Image: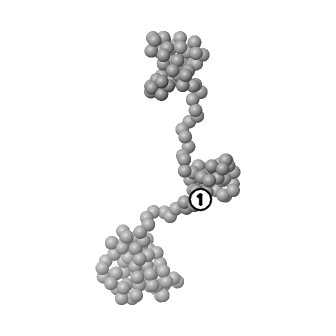
Amino acid sequence: MSSKVHVTKPLSSKLIIELLDENPDLEEINCPLSLYERTSEIYLDALAELGVVINIIESRGRPKKYDDDLKEKIDEMLDSGLSVKTIASKLNISSKTVYYLKKNKLKQGPKSKYSNKTKKEIFDMRNDGVPVKKISEKMNIPIRTIYYILKNNENLNEEVN
């Protein structure tokens, strides 16, 4: 028995009677806006006469499990040099959650094994008409990697200059 009730179904005469039977001292009914809009004016007037107030809940969806304070704390701990695993154990949450809540998301993939200077040499040789196989042999870099560098670093010439 409660003086406040939260409903997740449209207010019908049957539901209202059930709520009043289960909660004789009912004062407030909380419901989402979508349910309130579907409730008949007759039911709303009847509840008002009984002294029951209907509160419309603005928030939607599942409530957040972690607040902004925790996110800030995680970022501070990361900035101080603590590892994700250490932070997770100190805050009693999983490492996956720490990664999810941290401000700066993970950067994609590892850094390139080859410097921009090496990549520029590959571009220059290719622009001079040297076949990829010869570039691979001279630079001691696999052919597939040469093709990858040529394909994915088209703007390298502008970056290096």
Q: Residue furthest left?
A: 41
**Color style of the picture:** one colour
- Crowd around label 1: few <14 · some 14–19 · many ≥20 (10 Å): some
Q: Secondary structure at mark 1?
A: helix
Up-down: is 32 above or below 129? below
* Front-lying residue, 147 or 48: 147
Give the mark count. 1
> What residue did someone put label 1 on?
70
Relative image position of residue 154 (x, y in whole percent): 44, 25
Q: Is residue 118 left or right of residue 61?
A: right
Of residues 39 and 76, the one nearer the viewer is 76
- Which one is nearer the viewer's eye here, 98 or 115? 115
Does 155 appear above or below 2?
above
**In the rendering, at what x and y percent does residue 111 appear?**
58, 32
Residue in front for this viewpoint, 88 or 80: 80
Q: Image point 46% across, 85% down: which residue?
A: 26
Residue shown at 49% from the left, 14% from the top = 125
> Is residue 148 visible in the rendered structure shown here?
no
Instruction: Classify residue 101 as left or right of residue 58.
Output: right
Question: Toward which corner of the image does residue 112 lie, by quadrant?
Answer: top right
In the shown orientation, is residue 150 left or right of residue 88?
A: left
Q: Amino acid at mark 1?
A: Leu
- Residue at horizontal 57%, vertical 12%? 138
Does residue 123 appear in this view? yes
Q: Residue furthest front?
A: 161
Q: Where residue 45 appears, x then y in whole percent? A: 33, 84
Residue 48 picture location, percent across and down: 36, 85
